[in-house]
C-alpha cells in the first residue's frame, strides 16, 4: 500500500517504483457508469448466461 502523507520517509515516486506501479495509475479515479450502460450490460450477461452458444450477431438480434 502506498502512503501519500508528507512525513513519510520514502517518497511516493520511490514507493511506486518499488511496487512496479505507474504513478498515473495511483491517481486514477474510475468514471461512474450510467444507469443505461449498467442495464444493457446486465441484459447481455443474462442472455449470454441463458444461451452461451450465441455469437455477436445473434446476440444483437436477441437484444
Image (spheres, rainbow, N blue to C red):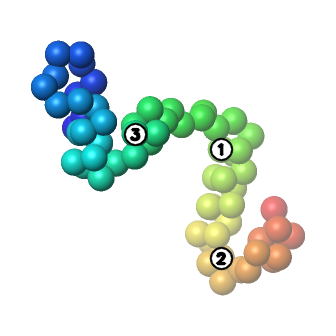
Determine whether the residue tagged by mark 2 lies in a helix, strand or loop.
loop
- Tag on residue 23? 3
Disc 1 crowd rating (10 Å Cα; few below 14, some 14-19, many 20+) is few
Above or below residue 46? Residue 3 is: above
Determine whether the residue tagged by mark 3 lies in a helix, strand or loop.
helix
Q: Quadrant of the C terminus?
A: bottom right
Q: What residue do we see at 34% from left, 48% from top?
A: 21
Disc 2 crowd rating (10 Å Cα; few below 14, some 14-19, many 20+) is few
Q: What residue do we see at 29% from left, 42% from top?
A: 16
Above or below residue 6? Residue 2 is: below
Above or below residue 34? Residue 7 is: above
Residue at mark 1: 38
Front of the two marks 3 and 2: 3
Image position, residue 20 (x, y; %): 30, 52
Residue at mark 2: 51
State the separation of the CA atoms marked 1 and 3.
29 Å
Image position, residue 57 (x, y; %): 82, 76
- Tag on residue 46? none
Amino acid at each position: 500500500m502506498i502512503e501519500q502523507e508528507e512525513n513519510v520517509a520514502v517518497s511516493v515516486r520511490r514507493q511506486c517504483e518499488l511496487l512496479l506501479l505507474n504513478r498515473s495509475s495511483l491517481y486514477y479515479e474510475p468514471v461512474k457508469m450510467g444507469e443505461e450502460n449498467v442495464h444493457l450490460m446486465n441484459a447481455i450477461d443474462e442472455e449470454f448466461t441463458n444461451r452461451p452458444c450465441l455469437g455477436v450477431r445473434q446476440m444483437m438480434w436477441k437484444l
